[in-house]
Image (tube, rainbow, N blue to C red):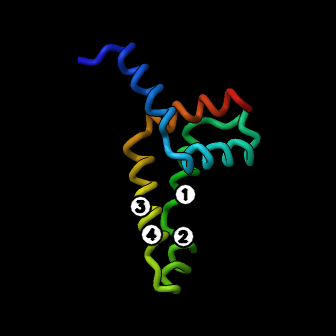
Amino acid sequence: MMLFEEYDELLKKTVAVAPDWVKSDIQDILKKEEGKHIGVSYVISQLNDRYSFSLRHILSAMDFSSEWTKVSRERLSFIDNNIDVVVALYYDLKDKL
């Protein structure tokens, strides 16, 4: 059984090595929406919208490239499997605004 202190330390280490793209995306969302007044659920929904099926997928398919589809799937998977990291990043980046 993991103690809270162990979980907190593990989360801090994970946030420190989180991918740059997720940090950048969260910063962009917070800046775009004047970050002080938006919640973490809004940020998560914006991240999901950013990588869900969209015009980018269609344009990528028209060029016979599946790269964007692969990238978006990987990023959606990261977001879904690491919600606690996304939440921690949100609070960390929001405090820096």
Relative side of 85 to 32, left or right:
left
Quadrant in which the C terminus appears:
top right
Rendering quarter of residue 36: top right
Q: What is the CA distance from the residue labelled 4 to the residue labelled 3?
A: 6 Å
Residues at circles 1 and 2 in contact by the CB criterion of under 8 Å: yes
- Residue 23: x and y in percent read 58, 43
The residue that disc 3 covers is 73
Q: Spot the residue most to the right.
A: 34
Q: Which mark is residue 69?
A: 4
Name the N-terminal-most of marks 1 and 2. 1
> Amino acid under label 3?
Arg
> Amino acid under label 2?
Ser
Q: What is the CA distance from the residue labelled 3 to the residue labelled 1?
A: 12 Å
Q: Spot the residue most to the left.
A: 1
Q: What is the CA distance from the residue labelled 1 to the residue labelled 2?
A: 8 Å
Is 50 located above or below residue 58 in the figure? above
> Amino acid under label 4?
Thr
Q: Which mark is residue 49?
A: 1
Residues at circles 4 and 3 in contact by the CB criterion of under 8 Å: yes
